[in-house]
Each structure stands twice: as C-alpha cells, then as structure tokens.
Image (spheres, coloured by chain):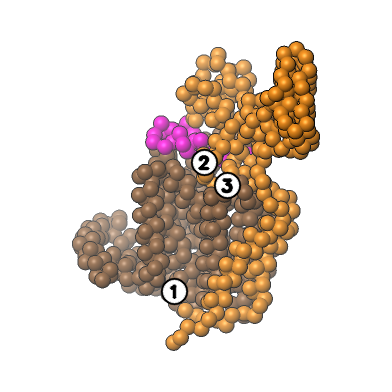
Chain colours: A orange, B brown
Amino acid sequence: MTRLRFPTLALPSLLVLTPIVLLVAAPAARADIAPTCDEEASLITCAAADVGKPCQGAGKCYAVSCSATTPPSTATTEYKCDACPTVLTTSSVTCSAANLQTACGDGATCMVLSAWCTPAGATNKYACAMPAAAPPTGPPTGETGAGGAGGASTTGAAGASTTGAAGASTTGAAGASTTGAAGAGTTGAAGASATGAAGSGTSTTGTGGTSAISGGGGCTIGGAQTTAGIAGGLLVIGLGFLSLSRRRRPR
Amino acid sequence: MLSGVVTIAAAPLDRARRALLLGIARVPALGAAVVRRDERLRLQALAGVTTAFALTLLCPGVPFVVAPALFGVVHLAADARYLVLRRGVPHWWGVALAAGCVALFALRALELGFPGRLPSAALEVGFGWGWAVAGAVAGWATTRSSLPARRRAAALIPALAAIGVAALAHPHLARLLFAHLHNLVAIGLWLLIWRQRRRFALPALGLLALAVALLASGAALPYVRFDGPWAARLVDESVFAWPRWMPQRTALGLGLSFVLLQSIHYAVWLSFVPQDDLRGQGTLSFQMSWRSLRRDLPLPLLVVTALAAAAVLGASLASVHRTRQLYMSLASFHGYLELAAGSFLYVRGWENPRCPRPAPGSSPS
C-alpha cells in the first residue's frame, strides 16, 4: 500500500473542523428536536395526559406508536396532535394500495389511514376519506398534565389549591393551582397553573386553562453545547484512530 | 486451517461451476459472455434489472425484506473492500474512514438506545457531509496539489458543503432522501470507477431508468401485487416515512423504486464491481475468490462480517421487521462511507496507483 507522509496539521484540523462548522452554520438544525420517529417530526407534540383532548386549530391528541419506518426503529410511544381524515362510509369504491389518491366519490379520495386514525375494529386501513381541512396549530390549550383531583363541584366553582391538585368543575370554573395540577372544566373555564410541570386545566367547551411553563410531552435535549460536545466526542474517536495510525510499525 | 476447510469445501462447487461454464460456452448466443467481461456484464446487468423489476411488481415485500437479510452485511464488507482496501488509499485515510464508520455507527446506536434525547439527525447529516468534504480534501492532499486534482477539489468541495448545509436545514428529510439516493451512488461509482466501456451498461441502465420512472410516478401501481408477503408492511413504511406534504401515491411509488434500486445496489457491490475489478476477463473460481478475499480482508474483519451476517439472518428468522429496521438503521453509515470514499477517489483519481488496470480491449486472460 502506498504510504504517504501524514500531511501537516491542516488535514486533521479540517477533518475535525468541517463537521463542526457545518453544524454551527445551521442553528435551526441544531435546535431541531429529533423525535423518535422521523415521520412524525412534523406533528405537534402534546402531553400523555392530553390524549383524546382537542388540539388547537383542529384535531386531537393521539398516542402514536413509532415503530414503523427506517430510520430509526425504536418502538416507543409519542403523543402528537393530528387531524384525521373524515372517512366516507357511503362510498362504493373499494380502496387499496393500487388506487391511492383516486377519486372515490363526494370529493373524497382513497388513502391509507395512519394507525391512530384507523377506526377501532377496522380491518382495512385503506379508506375513502377526505383530508382534514386544516392541521392542528398547537397542543391542547393549557397543555400538560391531568386535571385536578380535589375540590370538585358539579355546578359551582371548584376549589383552588396552592400546591396541590385543584378541583374540577362540571359547569362552573375549575380551580387554579400554583404548583400542582389545575382543574378541568367541562363547560366552564378550566383552571390555570402557574408553575405546574405536571398539570394545567382543560375545558371541553369553555375556556381552557393556561400554564406558565410548558410541561411534559416534548423531547428534552441539550442545547448547542450538547451538540458540539457530541460532535467533538465523535471526532475525538476519529482522531484517536488517526494518531494510532501514525505510529510506525516495527518492521 | 480455515483456508484448508474452505478450499476443500469449494472443490465440488468449482467442479460444478466449470461444467456449467463449459455448457454455457457451447451455446452460441451465450458463449461470448463466458469469456468476455463486457458481454457478460451486459447480459447480467440486464437480467438483474429485469428480475428485480419483476419481483418488485409481483411480490414487492419479498425483496424489501429478504434482500437486506441475505445481502446486507456482506455488501457492507464489499463496500470497504472495493472502495478502500483495494484502492491503494493511504493508510491514514483508511483509518479515517474506519473512524467515521465507527462514529456514525455509534451515533445510530445512541439514537436507538436513547431515542429522542439527541439531535441525532442533525448530527448524522452534519458529520456525514462533513466527512465527504474531508474526503475531497484528503484526495487533494495525496496528489501533492496537482493541478487537475486542485480543479476537481475546487468543483467538488463547495458543492458538497452546500448540500451539507442545505441538508442540515432539514435533517430528517435529508437522511430520508439520502437513504433513497445512496442506492444511486453505488451505480454511479460502478460506472465511474470500474466500468471501462460504459456503453455495455447502457441497456441495463436504460431499463432501470424506465422501471424507476414507472414505479416512482405511480404508473405501475395498478400492476403491483400488494397481496403478497410483507407488502402491507412496505406500504405502511413507504407512505408514512414522508412528511404530510408528500402525496401518498408518490410516497408509495418512491417506496417501490427504493425496493428495486436496493436490489440493484446489492448486485452492483456483490457482482458487477467484483467482476470489473479483476485484471482478467474471466471470472474467479470459488477457491480463487476465497484466496482473494483473504488477501484483502484481515481475518478479524472477515470473522466479524461472517458473524454479523449470520446474526442478521438468524435474527430475521425470529423477528424479520425488527431485524431489518435495526440493520437499516445501524448500517446507514455505509452511505456516507460511499460518499466520502468516492469524493476522495474522484479528486485523487480513480486508478489504484499500486495496481493500474490494463487498457480496455486487452487480450482476455
């Protein structure tokens, strides 16, 4: 094998610096939160406790099992807002992979429904359906956490709590909580939470609760320092190999 | 001892091979294919594309699932063998390539082990394209700044860097696109590095382009049998791999063209390139292939390859989709390896300085 002299420090420096420069050159990408599943990356994240609740704009919060595609391939559950297509049950067209996106009546087309949009008990995920008019614009209002447990009231205002879970109310205002979970209101205003990482109230028909701090549901990643650290670590491995390769072998 | 066992085991295979070749040589239409590499590869590539296209139409789930299980690991070894070990690259660049593979493999392993905790897509894309840029610079460095190399480097480096930055803006989409496009990188490298008389590859390439166009456009969808094994899985993974703006019909078409191109990708590394890399026109017997393999690959690498191939095959029998996904994820480093090693060779020059090939048309051996 042709053995050339190792070229100065310029080449190893470039080997190290180029990927870092590329990373630094794209701050938006560095801030990108890598989801478990690439294909769900574009969907808005909601909280586990918000599953089934309406998201802002349109759609609902679903539990999404990510195991389908490459890459990556870890089977985990994420919580995502999605607006599912409206399935037309009256269509006479049998949808399949072969006729995807062809018209099947009433302005609908044949499509593949995602697992979480497939109706329970359905055996076929191909359906004649109309895409949702608009995508969700945000997580359920006052996202994160379950509704409060204590101080429930059927018709009046539910109790507030400073550190614990606030009350729920069926028709009135739900309780507020300073550090815990706020209450849920069915027809009235839901509770607010000032710092609750776990909870904030929601309301089915009234005003949703608010939370000063966004809680769970999103992926926690490090910032630019973490990214640079990882990139540096990977490159140190490479440099280790390079320095090993420079050692002369005994002849 | 291992060599002795393999040599003994290969003897009956070689006798059968010799009888087969003699039989084929007596058929007037096929005789030239036995003794002339260009003719052989023209027929073989055409037959390969036709078969892969037919399988994609008749049972798309089968090549989608079976091909990586059978050929995945060995084609990684072929990548390393023909792009690095047999190309006469400097030792330090070979080590840098190995380190890059280890780093990208480790990154994927981290992503699998700690999902959602790292900006893995951005890291991978940044590292991979940065590696490709480093390959071009390394190629330039080994030529001691010759003018042609400098020109090639000046053209390639800004292009690679621009693609890298663009990819970093959408890292998830970028690595999905790269998973599809890297199949074409293999074909491009075969034509540029190994295929001396490219017109012999044109019939197969024309058919391949037509097949990909029919599949990707969705025109072939009504003729695809989706009731075969694993086809439903292929539909799911194809359609939901893409962001919502991608029409489902197009996504499925791209998934089917991926299946076709993946098969051709394996054929390129495991059959076309090994034949074109030989000095002579003929093919190697099994015993000669084994000796050549032993010369190229160090025993530890050979053992690791054999164990990994057996493990993937065995695990596929237990959990076929999980194994395939794991393999596809962990093996994604090889796409960037092809890119980085290809950049190096493009700038330095394709020819192996240790072992220049005979000119096209030299007498068969």
Residue picked out by circle 3: B115
Q: Which residue corresponds to mark 2? A: A75
Tell me the magenta residue range. B220-243
Nearer to us in this view, A92 or A243: A243
Which of these two is toward me, B194 or B177? B177
Determine whether B245 is above or below A28 in the image: above
Task: Report in which chain the residue with disc 2 lies.
Answer: A
**Residue on which the image places disc 1:** B357
Instruction: Locate residue B31: give its quadrant.
Output: bottom left
Which label's residue is closer to the chain start, 1 or 3? 3
Residue B302 included in the magenta stretch of the image: no
Identity of the residue drawn at 62% across and 49% down:
B117
In the image: residue A187, left or right of residue B9: right
Query: Mark 3: which secondary structure?
Result: loop
Q: Residue furthest bottom?
A: A251
Residue visible at 67% across and 38% down in the picture: A216
- Residue B63: x and y, percent? 41, 44
